[in-house]
Amino acid sequence: MYDFAYHRPATVAEAVKLLAADPEAKVISGGMSLIPVLKQRLARPSALIDLGAIPDLVGIAVSATTVTIRGRTTHAAVAASAEVKRAIPALAELASHIGDPQVRNRGTIGGSIAHHDPTADYPAAVLALGATVHTSRRRIAADDFFTGLFATALEPDEIVTAVEFPIPEKAAYVKFPNPASRYAMVGVFVAKGPMGVRVAVTGAGAHGVFRHAAMEEALAKSWSPEALEGITTPAADLNNDIHASREYRAHLVGVMAKRAVAKAG
Amino acid sequence: MPKVSLTVNGKPVTVEVENRTLLVEMLREQLRLTGTHVGCDTSQCGACVVHVNGASVKSCTILAVQCEGAEVLTIEGLASPDGTLHPMQEAFREYHALQCGFCTPGMVMSAIDLVQRNPQGLSDREIREGLEGNLCRCTGYHNIVRAIAAAQVVMHGKAKELPRAAE
Amino acid sequence: MGFEGIGASVRRREDLRFLSGRGTYTDDINRPNQTYAVILRSPHAHARIRAIDTTRARAAPGVLAVFTGADMAADKVGGLPCGWQVKNKDGSPMAEPPHPVLAVGKVRHVGDPVAVVIAETKAEARDAAERITIEWEVLPAAATIEAALQPGAPLVHDDVPGNVCYDWHLGDKAAVEAGFAKAHKVARLELVNNRLIPNAMEPRCAVGEYDPATGDYTLWTTSQNPHVIRLLMGAFVLNIPEHKLRVVAPDVGGGFGSKIYHYAEEAIVTWAAGKLKRPVKWTADRTESFMSDAHGRDHVTHAELALDEHGRFLALRVRTLANMGAYLSTFAPCVPTYLYATLLAGVYTTPAIYAEVKAVFTNTVPVDAYRGAGRPEATFLLERLVDIAALEMGMDRVEIRRRNFIPKDAFPYQTPVALQYDSGDYHRTLDEALQASGWHTFEQRRAEAARRGKLRGIGISTYIEACGIAPSAVVGSLGARAGLYEVANIRVNPTGSITVFTGTHSHGQGHETTFAQLIADRFGVPMSQVEIVHGDTAKVPFGMGTYGSRSLAVGGSAIVKASDKIIAKAKRIAAHLLEASVDDIEFKDGMFRVAGTDRAKSFAEVSLAAYVPHNYPIEELEPGLEETAFYDPKNFTFPAGCHICEVEIDPETGEVEVVNFTAVDDVGRVINPMIVEGQVQGGVAQGIGQALLETCVYDDAGQLLSGSMMDYTMPRADDLPDIRVGTAVTMCTHNPLGVKGCGEVGAIGAPPAVIGAVVDALRDWGVRHIDMPATPQKIWRIIEAGRQRRAAE
């Protein structure tokens, strides 16, 4: 790791100020993606701005229609939250299978979606549930948030403060993990509710998480695994690596989607 | 040099570190707590697991400076001052859940957190899934699972004595 | 104190330190005034070094020195030696190109060490290493066996034509041809034995130290055999005589073969410590381990088995291409030859066998022995071929094995491939495994799984292996450049406690417990009175180390031999003290007794007399009670057994779950059943890993694609089943303990049982064989192709 300056602001405003003052600085939340990158010397930020001392960024609030998870809430906290389990069980369950227990104890929702690793789980939930990302300066709709591989709509000095999920009628997430890393090789989140019927796929796409229009259309007509029969996923835009070819990933998208619909009930 | 103040195994310490110093580097190199091991550089193997504020974390994936004010528990701090082993340590010995011993400290620290978070008790399958963050190359995990299953009985107060392994 | 002797599952004595964080692994050792080495490695598989500029690195903060291959050459540092010379079919020696410690002129694999930076801290050394600039001339690479054997392929070593290290054979070619000429059927198989990366959990580490006052060097290293390292590094690389070089292998976090070899980094830190007159430490990052620890397996094989009309094996013909990697690692040449082709008889009476092995250099990390070493490759080939033969013959897989087993009254049994098996009962291990696994009720489980939409299959392997490679004279005639005996020194202390110095090394095997049990049993003393010392050339007289499941069979036998010498001498002392004839002295339960009387002296009393020789036969006997024994085995040992695996496949995703695994092994006499079970379970886990998960992948340019645990699938707890282990033993006939060995049986027996189960699960899809690892993608492709075939029909 290259050395860097380290800041531990006490408020979001202070963090934003630090970030705006130094274009080479990076925000660190749980650090579960960033620290491995730094250890491999693949990035050389001038400074790390640690959100770890900002109490406002932690917490879960559930209303009649939404679940709002603040940015620095850990996956373990979401997984263990009785309120989340009641309101959006699929979200709690997704959080309970991110990485491994130690990753879940440190990793945060804000960090996960701001990083937009193409194999991360949360982006699928954010997109499929039509969540709204709250930032230090605005609100961004899920459909506008993820813009490409490791890319989001966030400005350089913008911090994710919370994610607001509408409570769906039905939802489920099923993933096929990469056998080595255990990140999602293919993960499919299906949801039906106020946001309509939405299907988001993570792990498979060469440009990160994406919605599956054909599946959404089919499920809007008939919410059942059988409705997905015969729907294919074009392989051209999918990832290809030593673990899974594009074609295999395309196939798995179909299998995971059917299983997710069955699980959602 | 930046300084970090924290509690390690119940003792307050203040250590000079670089900002880039990892918690595991501080524990091993500066505090000479070499029971916590480094087995990989991609946060996969779990040999470095310690508890920070009661939660198991990979000490290779957290900066020392992030631990300001934290309570850190390592394998060295697990046994009672009189040397009595923690039930999980005892179970690992009784069930031959270690061979070369290198993954063992991280495995034990993860296992304790896993059991503590699941007071309802864990099935063997759940134990296996709960060990996703820890690699062992020697045992094939069979005896690790048996050790954790036995230790949870004692840790949850359902038995005073560790169930003995077969002779 | 409970029963501690032979056969007791004594809890391990080493565990307390490991469980409390008080083990001492090499990286836990820090010497005063220590410096840190970081090695700059080649990013290219094959390239010429046009120029290296270290100026900026030398000027970086904290840097003490930067060395390259030229600096070592100027100091007359030798290359890393190879410990085994295999001969070609025509009797000429194999190609043995030099293996410089730091690359000179050319690099030959990604990870080949090019320069070393030594600095006050590791971070400073690493920072400075990035400031070395190298002008490369990148060359085309030969990244696989096939690529290296193409006409006009890039030459890994300019003076090794065709990249062929050796072209070797074993067996009676004419007899095999005669066997095939009369065959009723021939079973054929092409297979790849997948390349593996050992990944012991402790990364390699080395600390070198030099004492300018005495001229003594010390190396602490993650080694399975410190004496071998001292010999190789001292005599061939650094020219340091043994008496000025101490090698210590403290607690070692797993080896599985990968820590047998003498590695460049050991020589670098030792040599640099002498140059700098300060201790130098190097610790591998896991990423470095992936590209610098010797890999394992990597064969391409074509095999044919001739059968008569009753399914009896008539002849076996095998052609194997074996990858050596870029350089010859310490024992690499013997792995695909004397540890492989000699095992091709398996447990069967095949009368004629002929094997040809071509070893090939490639632009990849050197390949050497990994858990099982040669024997897993032989077993996988043979057991897969037997399954295919059963298919060809329309015979049951169990029946065809039974029909060809070497019967238990045929021992000693001479195979057509050089080995003579001493004992075994293959029907018994088979019967017990069939029973324990519920083989005969499997079809019910298959049907039940089918109702859940799962494809269930069962697989079996009946394997044999050879441990404790020996005797020295024979292996010497086959090209080994070392003896393969073991050494024990037993020091009885004045008050009767016992210190045992063994030349073997424990890195997970529990020798401190098992060997202490042996001593407790032999001398009738409590284990608390016994200390086992290993891993330090300054303490242990000599030793060949631990690999190939040899520790108990060879090292344990040396301990027995030294114990016998101690008891013989102690009896003479006791006879003097008891005023009796030595022939009348019995030694039992720690007491020397005059036969048929109650006159006795305890072991402690006799020990004290040896060191305080006031009343002592000083004219005929020296004082003291300490003996050394070298044990050179008469033969290998031959563990064998039966492994049965059941899998379930999800036909939609291709995922395989191992749902049952049963092993029944004949490991000879069992000293500590708990430890034996653990060894078998660990071996099986690595076998399942090879069969389903692990594989090393290089791209055509020689880049390592499976270069971290993010891409190399290490078995995790939820990948593996409970592993049921049983033993059904016959005694080894030629060592004093009757032991055979248990460290590798799992890695040898498991892979064909797992793949057999996968193939069985997919039997409706027309599959005869699947190469390892049977990943979900591979299985999905098979099923998908089958579906399309069916749709077309």
Image (cartoon, coloured by chain):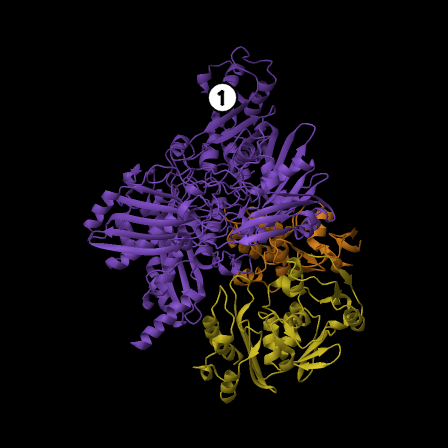
Question: Residue C173: x, y in percent?
Answer: 26, 43
Q: Is residue C287 above or below residue C570?
A: below
Answer with left or right where residue C1 lies relative to residue C316: right
**If the image is split into quadrants, where does the N terminus of chain C sit?**
top right
Mark 1, residues whose alpha carbon is within 10 Å: few (<14), some, or many (≥20)?
Answer: many
Q: Give the color of chain A as drawn.
A: yellow
State the residue position of label 1: C593
The picture places residue C6, in percent across and down from the top left corner, at 47, 37
**Residue B64's quadrant in the figure?**
bottom right
Q: Is the residue C661 above or below the residue B94 in the image?
A: below
Which quadrant: the C terminus of chain C?
Answer: bottom left
Residue with the most extreme bottom position: A221
Q: Nearer the viewer, residue A89 or C136?
A: C136
Residue B150, by quadrant, is: bottom right
* Residue C696 in picture, x, y percent from top left: 48, 56
**Between C379 and B89, which is closer to the camera in this rendering?**
C379
In-image side of A155 versus C329 (left or right):
right
Residue A144 on image: x %, y %: 64, 81
Q: Secondary structure at mark 1?
A: strand
| Residue shown at 74% from the left, 62% from the top | A46
Please, is residue C579 above or below residue C545 in the view?
above
Tell me the shade of chain C: purple
Amino acid type at mark 1: Arg
Q: Which chain is orange?
A: B
